Image (cartoon, helix red, strand yellow):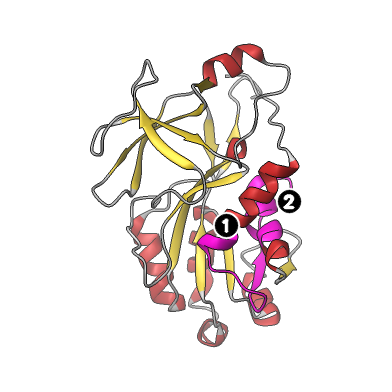
Amino acid sequence: SRPKIVPLTHANVCASARNIRTTLNLTAVDRCMNVMPLFHIHGLMAAILSTLATGASVFCTPGFDALRFFSWLDRAKPSWYTAVPTMHQAVLSRAKRNPEIVAAANLRFIRSSSSSLPPQVMAELEKTFGAPVVEAYAMTEAAHQMTCNQLPPGQRKAGTVGPAAGPEVAVMDESGPSLLAQGEVGEIVIRGSNVTPGYENNPKANQESFVEGWFRTGDQGVFDEDGYLSITGRLKEIINRGGEKISPREV
């Protein structure tokens, strides 16, 4: 697929910041340690703008570095951080070398997004830091978050990306616009105030991506009986390298 420009309005960005703030129960006493790059929607929205919208604080690192992560953790004393699964795995690989810092860390939760989090990594993170790990499903066209597992006392289901967390989320049949029932596999579609009004200068992509107000994500998924979404595949061609989306044509 060709790379597409995704315009996000001020309304999109503000709605997404509110959605993330609500999902994570953020308050002014929270502090986020940001290790995500700020050219990426994950870092901009989940770490920075949701924090600013809350009146909380954020400790910005120069970018992820597994060798420096624990010294930053000790210095920043955050209540949470968000990262992609490959970063979480790198943190876990060095956690045993920093037992005192790990023991002193007072994380309220850990967040993961941008690619699938293996259940064993989620379990090891929770065991290591003694904090719940919530996995979210997000994309640039939605100004980041679409679904997210719940913090306690809500439910976390490893291997799923949780229930809708802001926009409406549904599963549609291939031809559209018929929505499918719980348990049926189809294309994940979204609509809401955080969703882009359309791609820039690309009427063909807009015609293909929007149907009766729903945005077609290109991802395939299924809802369980509790309304938790599992992603089963990708319908569009794209390379996902550690959470970074790469167009094959660009390569």
Instruction: Give the residue drawn at x 36%, y 19%.
Output: 174
Mark 1, residue position: 20
Is 220 left or right of 108, judged from the image as shown? Answer: left
Q: Earlier in the sequence, mark 2 or mark 1?
A: 1
For the N terminus, the quadrant is top right
Residue 214 visible? The answer is yes
> Relative to 100, does residue 224 appear above or below in the rendering?
above
From this view, report whether residue 107 is shown above or below residue 122.
Answer: below
Whole-angstrom CA distance, mark 2 to mark 1, is 17 Å
Decide which of 109, 96 is in the foreground and name it.
Answer: 109
Please tell me how many numbered marks the rendered image carries: 2
Local packing at callout 1 (Cα closer than 10 Å; few below 14, some 14-19, many 20+) is many
Residue shown at 25%/39% (left/top)?
Answer: 182
Q: What stretch is highlighted in magenta?
A: 21-50
Picture coordinates of residue 39, whole percent (x, y): 73, 45
The answer to which quarter of the image holds residue 176 is top left
**Looking at the image, which residue is at 54% across and 83% down?**
106
Position of the C terminus, as image quadrant, is top right
Q: Are marks 2 and 1 in contact (CB under 8 Å)?
A: no
The label on residue 147 is none
- Front label number (2 vs 1): 1
**Res 64 seen here:** no
Element type where label 1 sits in the image? helix
Q: Residue under circle 2?
A: 38
Name the side, left or right, on which 51 lies relative to 146: right
- State the image quarter where residue 34 is shown: bottom right
Residue at image coords 70%, 81%:
75
- Three-letter code for the amino acid on which mark 1 is drawn: Ile
* Residue 246 higher or lower than 81, as above or below: above
Label 2 is placed on what type of residue?
Leu
Label 2 neighbour load within 10 Å: few <14, some 14-19, many 20+: some
